[in-house]
Amino acid sequence: MGSVLATSCVFVLIFIHVATLSALLPSCPLECLCLSQTQVLCNSGGLQEIPLKLLPPTVEHLSLTRNDFPIIKSDSFAGLRFLKKLSLDGNNISLIKPFAFRGLPRLRDLSIQHTPLETVSPFAFAGLQNISAIFLSYNKIKKVESYAFAGTINLKQLVLAHNPLLKLESNAFTGMTEIDRITLPSGIRTLEADCFNGLDTLGHLQLAFMDLRHLKGGIFRGLTNVNYLSIQESDLGNIEGDAFNDMTFVRNLNILNNKIDSIQWLNFTWEQHVGHLRFQGNHILEIPRAETLLVEVEKLTVIQNHFPCDCHVHSLLDGPLANGSMIHFVSKNYCISPLEVNGLPMSSIDIDSIGRCQEEVTRGNLEASKDSSSSAQRLSTFCSYLNLMLYFLKLLRIT
């Protein structure tokens, strides 16, 4: 009897001990694996909402991949003040509400990839003041709306690759004041004016494989300190008059391998402080007039482009793109038309045998006529002055 009682007491003590430990240990959601109080894995758990109240408040790395979250609500992670890394990959996310990640002052890396998310809504990532990297690749994003990243002042890397992104709205990136790199997908069709406004300091931006009707004014407004900007492998349509007017302090600007229907005006002034402008590998269907080109940059490289070798070629060689050396220019660039010279180096054709366009001849004659008229007028004025002096001399003799 005594041994039975002793055994019962032992079991009671063990039960009390386990209950006490359970009460002292922080909880962990059943669908999750809490490796420690700083690292929690809730992968493939079938979660339909974020188990915020059951998560250790000290968690630093939280993975919630391959669950079933259709919406990330406002303040979904409020209280997880020690969280540094968060992954929401592979979820059924279709909407991120404003200030969804508010209350995460230490969050550095955020990954939301492989989801059906189509639109990055205004203020979706607002409040992430200390975020370093946001990964949004392999989603269904078609549009980045205004102020989506407002307040992400310390963001260094934004990755939007592999999305069917069609449109960048005005102020889409406002709030990223010092970002090192933005990675955009191919296929963009619309760049609204001011879409890059607010990117005061930008390390690297590549705009590739776009399909634009025109490159219009105001697109680059707000880019005030850029290390590297490349516009490449795109159909740019018509480059309008003030397309590049609003960018300043760009150390490297590359316009590479694009199809350009026409250049209405290409304007770079010394006040914009453009370092190296590389205009390379482009196919230009219509030669711009020399007077529509103003290229004041520290270094200019114009090579491997294809220009029409027609009557307008003289205007091209007289303009700033020739960079003061016609011989070097024709040896480094090619003809795109007429058909019989397509693909040939410009140096292989007899430029002098190509007659100037009628409007250029007419303009030249008018300018010559103006110069002649001006000279005749100056001569007439001088003769009148001389006759007047002779008249006064005669008067002096008479008196």
Image (cartoon, rainbow, N blue to C red):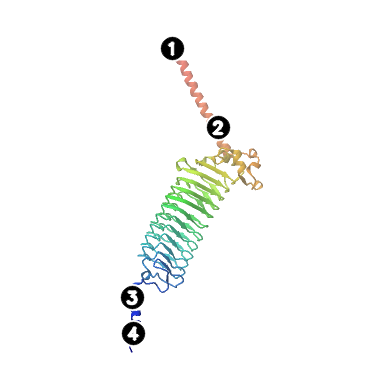
Sequence-wise first label, 1 or 3? 3
Q: Residue at 53% across / 48% down in the picture?
A: 255
- For residue 30, side relative to residue 209 (left or right): left
Camera-side residue of 285 and 317: 317
Q: Please say if 387 is above or below 285.
A: above
Contact (CB < 8 A) between labels 2 and 1? Answer: no
Measured as percent of width and height from the top left, residue 287 is found at 57, 44
Q: Amino acid at mark 2?
A: Ala
Task: Say the numbered circle drawn on residue 368.
Answer: 2
SS under mark 4:
helix
Q: Which residue is mark 3?
A: 20
Alpha-carbon span between mark 3 and mark 4: 21 Å
**Of all residues shown, which one is farthest toward the front?**
2
Sequence-wise first label, 2 or 1? 2
Q: Please say if 370 is above or below 23.
A: above
Alpha-carbon span between mark 4 and mark 1: 150 Å
Q: Please say if 65 is above or below 131.
A: below
Q: Which residue is mark 1?
A: 396
Nearest to the eye among marks 3 and 4: give it.
4
SS under mark 1:
helix
Q: Amino acid at mark 3?
A: Thr
- For residue 173, side relative to residue 335 (left or right): left
